[in-house]
Amino acid sequence: MALRSLVESANVPGCDFPLEHLPWGRFERSSHPGEWHVGVAIGTKAFDLTEFARAGHCGALDPMLRDALHRGCMNALLALGRPAWSQARRWAQRLLSADEPALRDRADRDRFIASQDQLRMAMLAEVGDYTDFYASIHHATNVGSMFRPDNPLLPNWRHVPIGYHGRASTLVPSGTAVRRPCGQTSTADAGPPSFGPCRLLDYELEVGVVLGPGNEQGDRIDIASARDRLFGICLVNDWSARDVQKWEYVPLGPFTAKNFSTSVGAWVTPLEAIEAWMEPGPVRDAAAPENLPYLRWKDDFTFDLKLQVLLRSARMREQGVPAMQVSLGTYRDMYWTFAQMLAHHASTGCAMRPGDLLASGTVSGPTPDSRGCLLERTWRGTEPLSLPDGTQRKFLEDGDEVILRGWFEGKGSMPRIGLGECRGVVLPALV
Amino acid sequence: MALRSLVESANVPGCDFPLEHLPWGRFERSSHPGEWHVGVAIGTKAFDLTEFARAGHCGALDPMLRDALHRGCMNALLALGRPAWSQARRWAQRLLSADEPALRDRADRDRFIASQDQLRMAMLAEVGDYTDFYASIHHATNVGSMFRPDNPLLPNWRHVPIGYHGRASTLVPSGTAVRRPCGQTSTADAGPPSFGPCRLLDYELEVGVVLGPGNEQGDRIDIASARDRLFGICLVNDWSARDVQKWEYVPLGPFTAKNFSTSVGAWVTPLEAIEAWMEPGPVRDAAAPENLPYLRWKDDFTFDLKLQVLLRSARMREQGVPAMQVSLGTYRDMYWTFAQMLAHHASTGCAMRPGDLLASGTVSGPTPDSRGCLLERTWRGTEPLSLPDGTQRKFLEDGDEVILRGWFEGKGSMPRIGLGECRGVVLPALV
């Protein structure tokens, strides 16, 4: 039996943001230009908790939580940890219930309940550092087999949650257009290179996790504490310039090939909202070696988050043709869990800070139609996709829009909930 | 003829911080706990510009510059760009002159002039993103030849200023002790791995550059604008866990091997202070290919910055034995310039922000005694160093202190100036 909200659009079956969900976002309202507020999504609306706090209606909350809401400072809220997150969530859920008069019957309710389409979304928090992992064994094996057919998976891969530091300055919220980068590429392995617009522009379907309380530099993080340090999940598109990447990545890894833009879903789903879907994990095959103790946790979890990529060309938009599904997979297919990524990241004493973003790396499954980037989906362009507008795609063209979606199917008393969308249109290169 | 300062220690020949230098720093004073002030070093003292501004003595400065100083916000000052930096420098230089009564004759002068040893230094600015390059051809060739004797320098190296994103959260100012990390390592290339204290802990002698005005995401940076975007240089020690690095770095580059700590010299030397030492550069051998146009600039520059590494064991400190020189080299030996690193970094449209830190990668010269890390200096431990305490070093031991120094020799009317020190003691691992 689904919960009923005072926001009617939240009660429509199949909507992304029912009362059971309440993902967090940070936004600017046209009524308050220049201010960042935080709030939760409900149906097609958002509950502006910063405005509610400033109106003096948060007296029931702990002072530090109230202060974080009042300031619209998500990093402060993330630092408070799980008890505060839980308190805020329960309180917002009660206020947004159809049965609760405190908000429902206010004459000035619209001051606190805004339409999502009236919001200018920001990244949920200021991201001190952004890290990208490589946690799908299918993705790693596919990409490896293109370059090393005899030995696709490197010896370290099943022992180390491989990752690299990403670029925090170019994280953008869903909806931000992405400029096709220029870069240095070479058609021959030995050069000479040239400089010009990327010819092999790709997306990568990923899931991100926003961190809460961190650690002191020099200390490690016990994997068993991960549940209290992982705030919530979101969609991530790690746009990639494959031709730039191929030429530059040896020996220090991807750099300019991925530093031009990373799109992030604007609404972050707290882990508390998806507890019904958590299952023991990760799922491993019989050949998998036992991991080192710092990566083992008896309560480690994964989840069957459905993940979809859709593509819509400029011509399809003109023709009114809906976006085409390119792939459909599930996060359950990932080899490494977020808890393992976090414990490994901090295993050398690296300081993690509230608001840091970890992304999973491309989520690919075992079948061709569950491959989460075009490099794999078209197998380096050898198996192009046919679009409804009559064109083919090996890699992205200017005007293409990539739309990532993620959702949990209804389960028991829990209705389906969705992570919303992470979308971006490719703009032509500036030459 | 050297300039004379009202601070007598700045007039001692050979000191790092004469009146011609004036490097910038950010610090907390015991008289103002909990506040970060900015100022310039002069002799053994620092001129607290934030305190001076708060006392209302900065009326001669542009309002935005005054405001940045008043707030102690170096990022704001960096964003103002070269005209503001130059104005602040000239103004501070005049005030600190022995001939200028405005500060010299103030009864409350000590309010604004503090002893450096009374300051708790911070990183100069909040670093949004930190990037580490690999710009020494000698370092790249040496390291490459250990792993690929027949083909030490990869085909992309002379075309691409190779770099990778580093970890901003673990940048620490000089003087901060460095905890030996634990990490995942393997003695065999194929595993199995184990987890424990790093056995091959190394330093890397590098030079960093702090950025001023950045670019909008999606735009590139013209290399010819680099001089206006590079604020100043500092010493950097990119501590490295070589055994962790060896096991983890394929295919996405160094990650936990370098994310535990990066030490940064606390005083940043503005480029304006070293103009006398700038020379056309970089110096290239005849075999060097011409670089792509976006990496060419007729006014590009390098400099003969002398760079020294010293090592002092715990026993040497107990015995009162001074630190031993391990290497001596010069920044002039670098293949890639900071202007090239910046232009390449932004070549795909990556947004650069004021306060970002770029580091050069290990500065190694052509001779064994100019190699800037132990991996090269002891050739993977095959040629250990003998210390005055009777012990040998292949890699760093607990208690070892690494001290980096950099300086420009006197030239024409310019006295010698020094970048100060970047030091750190190795603490034992937490097991």
Image: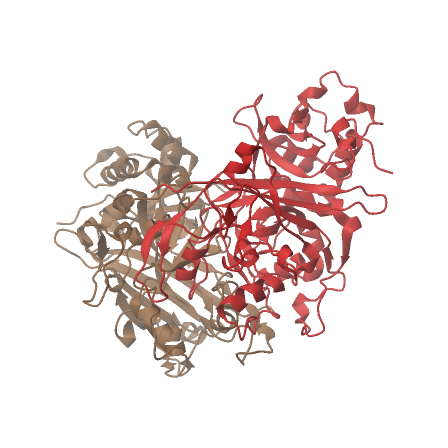
Chain colours: A brown, B red
**Residue at position x 42%, y 44% from top?**
A351
Q: Residue at x 43, y 45 (%)?
A: B180
**Residue B410 in sight in this render:** yes
Is A258 placed left or right of B222 in the picture? left
Residue farthest front in this picture: B390
For the view shown, which residue lies furthest in the top direction? B107
- Nearest the viewer among A8 and A375 is A375
Instruction: Name the side, left or right, on which A425 lies relative to A160.
Output: right
Is any part of residue B75 visible from this angle?
A: no
Residue A326 x, y percent position in the rendering:
33, 73
Vertical arrangement, residue B421 with respect to residue B139, above or below: above
> In the current view of this chain or complex, which residue is farthest to the right?
B1
Asked whether, in this view, residue A166 is left or right of residue A228, the answer is right
Figure quadrant of the C terminus of chain B: top left
- Quick one: A292 or A27, which is closer to the camera? A292
Asked where in the image residue A103 lies, by quadrant, the reply is top left
Q: How many marks?
A: 0
Residue A137 picture location, percent across and down: 30, 67
Q: Which residue is more in the foreground, A21 or A322?
A: A21
Q: Which quarter of the rendered picture does the N terminus of chain B lie within?
A: top right
Judge from the rendering whether residue A35 lies leftward or rightward of residue B37; answer left or right. left
Classify B230 as above or below A48: below
Q: Position of residue B141 (x, y in %)?
A: 58, 66
The location of residue A138, given as percent across then percent down, is 30, 70
